[in-house]
Image: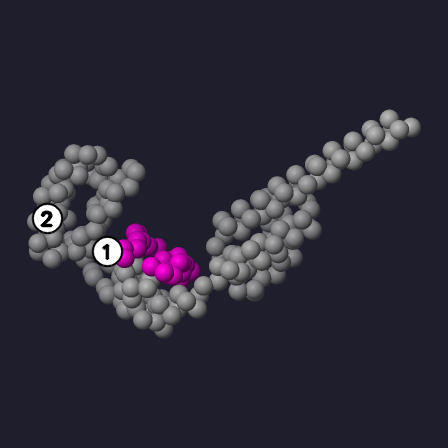
């Protein structure tokens, strides 16, 4: 009898372990799903979401059947991100910010190679002396240069056309100039990017540099982008 009892206890322990593993997996998958959907995450932050409806949607998309486990995971996620709500501080910084706009902007993307950097040094110095707009970003696969249309061909010639991966002209640069305490407040770039994307505006490039938060958009989106960002600053 004692051996039989021991056997059933063992089975019970294994089942319990499997259940806990399953619940953990559901919780992790639920969190990953929400993290991958910023609009859902925003609704959770502001407490304006129907958790039952969200749970059913997640169940359908990640292929699980335990609605209670998904529902619990959603509610726990909500508790965990409450500290992330930072909109008041973000708006305080943005209320002291201002907008600047530059038209006729070009983006040139070149191969990320050492000799390209060597070629860029003299031409960049020359262009900067003219007080021309110029930003350069080195990524793992390319070097992106943001400048004005009137020096685009000059840069392409200096780099060499065979080294150019991509080039676009006629874009618009919209910059949000903020006070120095911007570096103390997380989430400003994300906040502004979300505002633009929620209106269907694609940022060709987006970056943050000290007090400047910069968005490059297509000319057709200029008016709407300005309107969205202006409202974000109010």
Mark 1 surroundings: few (<14), some (14-19) or many (≥20) residues within 10 A:
many
Asked if the stretch drawn in magenta spans residue 69, the answer is no
Identify the residue shown where x is 53% and y is 60%: 82
Residue reaching furthest front?
2
Q: Is residue 232 left or right of residue 80?
A: left
Identify the residue shown where x is 65% and y is 53%: 71
Where is residue 80? Give x, y as percent: 55, 55
What span is colored magenta in the figure?
A: 183-210
Please indicate, yes or no, whether residue 118 appears anywhere in the rendered image.
yes
Residue ID for mark 2: 125
Where is residue 63? Give x, y as percent: 62, 42
Q: Is residue 207 above or below residue 18?
A: below
Identify the residue shown where x is 48% and y is 55%: 38
Where is residue 229? Give x, y as percent: 34, 66
Mark 2 surroundings: few (<14), some (14-19) or many (≥20) residues within 10 A:
few
Element marked by disc 2? helix
Q: Is residue 2 left or right of residue 41?
A: right
Residue reaching furthest right?
1
For the residues marked 1 and 2, what is the alpha-carbon distance in whole angstroms? 23 Å
Q: Earlier in the sequence, mark 1 or mark 2?
A: 2
Q: Quadrant of the N terminus?
A: top right
Where is residue 60? Give x, y as percent: 62, 47
Element marked by disc 1? strand
Q: Which mark is residue 140?
A: none
The quarter holding residue 185 reads bottom left
Please indicate, yes or no, whether residue 218 appears anywhere in the rendered image.
no
Residue ID for mark 1: 171
């Amino acid at each position: 009898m004692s051996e039989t009892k021991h056997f059933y206890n063992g089975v019970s322990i294994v089942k319990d372990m499997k259940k806990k593993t399953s619940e953990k997996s559901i919780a992790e998958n639920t969190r990953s799903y929400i993290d991958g959907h910023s609009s859902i995450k925003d609704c959770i932050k502001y407490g304006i979401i129907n958790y039952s409806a969200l749970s059913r949607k997640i169940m359908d998309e990640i292929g699980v059947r335990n609605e209670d486990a998904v529902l619990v995971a959603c509610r726990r996620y909500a508790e965990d991100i409450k500290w992330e709500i930072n909109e008041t501080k973000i708006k305080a910084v943005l209320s002291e910010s201002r907008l600047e706009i530059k038209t006729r902007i070009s983006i040139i993307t070149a191969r990320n190679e050492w000799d390209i950097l060597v070629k860029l040094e003299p031409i960049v110095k020359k262009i900067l002396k003219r007080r021309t707009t110029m930003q350069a970003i080195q990524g793992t696969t390319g070097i992106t240069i943001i400048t004005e249309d009137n020096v685009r061909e000059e840069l392409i010639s200096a780099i060499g056309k065979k080294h150019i991966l991509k080039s676009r002209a006629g874009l618009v640069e919209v910059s949000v100039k903020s006070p120095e305490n911007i570096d103390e407040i997380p989430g400003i770039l994300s906040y502004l990017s979300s505002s633009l994307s929620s209106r269907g505006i694609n940022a060709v490039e987006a970056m943050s540099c000290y007090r400047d938060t910069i968005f490059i958009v297509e000319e057709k989106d200029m008016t709407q982008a300005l309107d969205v960002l202006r409202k974000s600053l109010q």
